[in-house]
Image: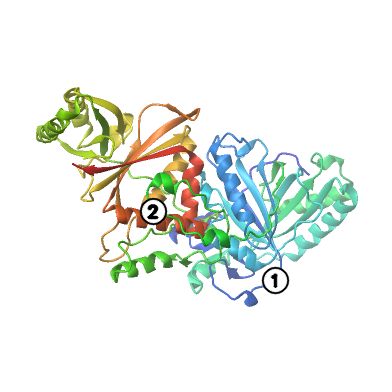
Amino acid sequence: MAEQPKVVLIPVSRSMRIALTTLQHLMIPYVCGASWSKILPASDLPHNAVLSVCKLSLRAGIDVSQGEQMAARFWAASLEYIRSIPDCTALYWAYIENKPETLIALIQWKAVSAWKSFQSSIGFRLMTGILTTECLNRASSIILPDSVTAGDVIEIAAFQLAATEPMVNFSATWAQFAAGATKTINPQCVVFGGWLERDGPYIFNSLELKALADTQPNVFLAFLFYKHRPVTIGTLPSSLQENISLLSRYTTDHDILTSPVHRELLEQPINDSSILSQPISCRSISELLSIHPPRIYRQENGFWKSQDRIHGQSLEDQRVGKRLFPGPRGIFTAMGDLNQYSLPQVSRLQPPSIHDVILLHSVKSPETSFQEFFNLQNFCGAWESAGNLGAQLLKSDSQWALMLSFGDSKSRTRQLPQILSDLQSFEIVDCYTMANPANLNELHLSLAGFGAHRLKELVTFYVRRGGADQSLFESAYSDFIDSMKLYTPNPPNTACVPYGGGWDSGLRKRSGVDVLRFNAVITWYSLEGMEEWYSDFANGAMQSYERLGHIIDRLQLVTVDVESLLFRPL
């Protein structure tokens, strides 16, 4: 049937798009009249199989079939996680022919309860840093035939009927075509199809949204799995051509042809009880990123709806003195919130203040080093009085650090050369800039400094080079620092506060890979609080990929290396 394939987007009428925009996209996926987010006993759900039909539109230039691209590693991690959801019986994916940035995934679920588990899971959440808005998350109560195999080429055609138009005539015409096609072109082509489930209102009892949902067109998806090459209409018997002519009045002109399809091998359920029984002690972000959270779906993931119950319990435990500080807060967005009406908000780092961290070694004799650094502290006072600048001198076990916070780009340009000149009696080991100099004028400038917490952890990530890689990193790191924040009335003291965070200038090599350097400072109240928080994060990540594990996984995927140095004020 393939003639001129086009990119598919199951259509939403213009009036519905306007209404949905006005109502803040409060339509979500449903199956058999039940919302993905409505909590129901499994016994109350239909037991029929469900096919998830997902279309993911990636940013231009991204191709997950190219293993060297970072997006390919995120895609593989997503598929590994989805395969672990119970009662996933088949998973196929392909990209649209000549459009590798548009992915189609067909996921077969044994029952509606399994489909709801998928929608309540992270799903393809790992990809949101590089997704565009033209995504699709729909379902149909059909079963993929056993004759569908890896390497098939898929043609998908969408047929649309108005909500008030009877479906019986189309169904009869399709049944005639499918029966004739099975006799004529089988086994060259496997033909099947089914009605898409109708989306419904997010607010179950909203009459306004229900009335809007009732205006949705009915959409029938036809699937043709070709074993060799697509069949053209002109080669078909006249009877099939007549059926196609009758079907064409319903077509949306949104048919597609895919690349050869990939079939994911489904794994047996993993017994990870031994992992969960081994507590982890962790004292830095570099230690944190050395663990490997399993990409396993867990129904008991620590959340009640969108509330992190484990974090809430840590707030209570801190209040009654059972712990020093509240623990990390889980970050979670469900697959059900990724659909044709809405896209989960992509985490982005706020523009940083202009920070420089200069690591120093003394080049003079040990006898004069104390006086030398006493003089350096005097320098800090002089620099601060000379302009829009904050300066702080810190020390680790083996070296010193000078932390500078500039109020604006002009101050940095004017003062930094003089500061470097004043440091001539020291060996400058490295200079970590926390803003790309090319973008200094675009930053929200601040003299916030580095806060009252005494310990400063200088963190350096070596991130693979590439625009998509930087976006994926920023999304992951933003979630990481968001887990440090407390969103509660009258919050208690926190173990840590993130400061700074920005891209250094210049391209570097790390482990033979071209990398960019991202520098940040995390301030800590105490060593004990630091170990308590990092250990909580590590153990929470091992216990729930949905809650914290995906943050570590994403940071590990996109970084080549991470370094951590801890400093104290002199």
The one of 314 and 485 positioned closer to us in this rendering: 314
The correct choice, above or below, for 432 with respect to 313 in the image is: above
**SS for callout 1:** loop
Specify the quadrant that holds the N terminus.
top right
Does the rendering let one see residue 43? yes
Image-quadrant location for residue 99:
top right
Question: To which residue does mark 1 refer?
Answer: 47
The correct choice, above or below, for 453 with respect to 472 in the image is: below
Other residues around mark 1 within 10 Å, as few (<14) / some (14–19) / many (≥20): few
Would you say 451 lies left or right of 259 here?
left
- Of the numbered discs 1 and 2, the one sitting upstream in the chain is 1
Question: Residue 534, labelled with which disc?
Answer: 2
**SS for callout 2:** helix
Q: Amino acid at mark 2?
A: Tyr
Task: Check the image and name the residue furthest to the front.
Answer: 367
Q: Amino acid at mark 1?
A: His
The one of 447 and 245 positioned closer to us in this rendering: 447
Q: What's the distance in space between the residues labelled 1 and 2, CA to CA?
A: 43 Å
Residue 504: percent from the left, percent from the top?
Answer: 35, 32
* Badge nearest the viewer, 1 or 2: 2
Q: Are marks 1 and 2 in contact (CB under 8 Å)?
A: no
Residue 12: percent from the left, percent from the top?
Answer: 57, 55
Would you say 183 lies left or right of 195 here?
right
Residue 227: percent from the left, percent from the top?
Answer: 81, 43
